[in-house]
Image: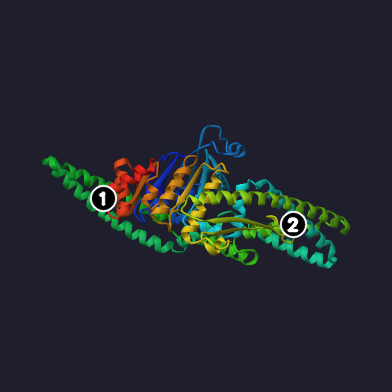
Amino acid sequence: MLKKLSIRDFAVIDSLDLEPGAGLNVFTGETGAGKSIIISALGFLLGERSGSDILRPGAASAEVEGEFEADNLPAHAAERWGISGKTFKVRRQADPRGRTRAAVNGAPATLAQLSELGGYLVDFHGQNEHQSLLKPETQRDLLDRYGRLEKEVKAVAEAWAAAKSLEEALNAVSMSEDERARLLDLYKFQLNEIESANLKEGEEEELEALWPRLKNSEKLSTISGEAHAGLDDAAGAAEKALERLKALSAIDATADPLAARMNSAVIELRDLCGELRSYGKAVHSDPAEVDRVLSRLEKLKSLKKKYGADIPAVLARAEELRTKVGSLDDMSLDRSEIEKKLAAARAKLEKLASALHDKREAAAKKLSAEIIKEAEGLGFKEVRFSVDCAYDEAALASSGGDSVEYLFTANPGYPLRPLRYTASGGEMARIMLALKTVLSRADRIGAQVFDEVDAGVGAVTGRLVGEKLAKLARDKQIFCITHLPQVAAFGGRHYFVEKDVRDGVAAAAVRLLDDAARELEIARMLGGKKQSTDLGLKHARELLAESRK
């Protein structure tokens, strides 16, 4: 559970401190007010990738810090981070170059470690996440998560890798010495090319964020210099005006407020001058740095062209090459011995994959029944849903031999068909909510985020969604961004997000609504007007009263 969330200079948020409740926390406000930015900040805190564009204009850095309860952390994760108390803190910062640094309970953490930790803390359901439910691999992974089959899946993956390695070894002893030597040289050359590049996680994103600034350093320096000169002149003129106001104030005390305001303006102008001067110095062209970044980007581009679509794919190719090199290097085993080992490895793989299939099939039946039960409470009158788990021994892979497909129909008399062909956007969002509700009972994740889960549904179904979220919030901490008053009425805590302009820069503000303010906000959502009518307020009060029953 998230106890506190502090956000500084992140996108349109200059400063925000939240202490969400244990149940259903709803966020409402006009479109574009910045509601989703709060969720983005939480995602950034827990390992999502980012760039320099998350910084608020003029800020030296962006920072997000969260305090979490440690109840749901696995023992190994708590031990890894030295967490012995009831709560712990996670902090992440980003600078103008897109570089980030993070810490868990004060100990430095990598992006991968943050992401792993975040998987134990918060489950995100974004506006478009239900689209991922159309992918067979996502459907399989969700089934495994529901059945708590992680250990069995890992065992199959390890058995598959072992069999793959022996297949490589068998291929190696089956080829001629000249062919083996040629391939060994090729694989070693390719592996060395990747390893010598010393690839680092997140480096490419950092370089791409830095490059436009380096490339345009002279232009940025000139513009900031001109702006500084203009501000310096303005500050000088303001200082002279301040002296005259002080003289005025000495004669007439009623001018004191004017002098105080001018004094504040002078301080702000001088601060801006100082920041612009520092900015100008920081963007001076460094030819060596320009060459370094450009050559590094070209190197990464070359590696991706040869070995994979992105850096993770390149690193995966390196691991594959290591296996091939090891197989070709180790000629100590003869062909018959390798064949014997390979047969045993394949038999082990088939046995583990078959056992995994049996468990997946049992989990699929239970999951199907539970989703139907949850979906019936979300406005589906005669919904049918089934998780099909087909096994093909000839198609064994690292994930096993199962082809998982979610079948669905909401129309009586129509056959079950794959979810991707039958469900509308609103139906998909509700199926995902039903799935999340079922999964929440099967995992230890303490908080869930729903970003506009009610998209594409009407008022009647919206009420059902609100009821489902409120029910889910009895055991989980829920964060929900919504535009439907029927959903917002069920919130245990209701936050209103609005955007205004401060010193010429847009800024989002968040406030916790009391009972009277909630009535006004829900009335606004009902009528689409800033000024609530008596009828709108009456309807809002009815919604709130019904949600408490």
Viewer-side residue, 473 vs 66: 473
Dot 1, how many residues are within 10 Å of its Cα: few (below 14), some (14-19), or many (20+)? few
Left or right: 122 as drawn, with respect to 282: right
Left or right: 71 as drawn, with respect to 248: right
Residue that extends furthest to the front in the rendered view of this protein: 413
> Which numbered mark, 1 or 2, is in the foreground of this view?
1
Viewer-side residue, 298 vs 483: 483
Q: Position of residue 86 (x, y in %)?
A: 52, 33
> Measured along the vertical axis of the image, is residue 181 above or below residue 444?
below
> Measured along the vertical axis of the image, is residue 352 above or below residue 194?
above
Residue at 72% from the left image edge and 63% from the top image edge: 189
Q: Position of residue 335 (x, y in %)?
A: 87, 59
Examine the image and state in which quarter residue 31 appears. bottom left
Residue at 74% from the left image edge and 59% from the top image edge: 393
| Amino acid type at mark 1 | Leu
Residue that extends furthest to the top in the rendered view of this protein: 85
Whether tag 1 and tag 2 are in contact, CB under 8 A, the answer is no
> Is residue 511 visible to us here?
no
Chain-order first, disc 1 or disc 2 = 2
Examine the image and state in which quarter residue 169 appears. bottom right
Dot 2, how many residues are within 10 Å of its Cα: few (below 14), some (14-19), or many (20+)? some
Which disc, if any, is residue 535? 1
Viewer-side residue, 115 vs 197: 115
Which disc, if any, is residue 387? none
Q: Which element type, helix, strand or loop, lies under badge 2?
A: helix
Residue at 48% from the left image edge and 49% from the top image edge: 377
| Amino acid type at mark 2 | Thr
Q: Which residue is mark 2?
A: 323
> Measured along the vertical axis of the image, is residue 193 above or below residue 261?
below
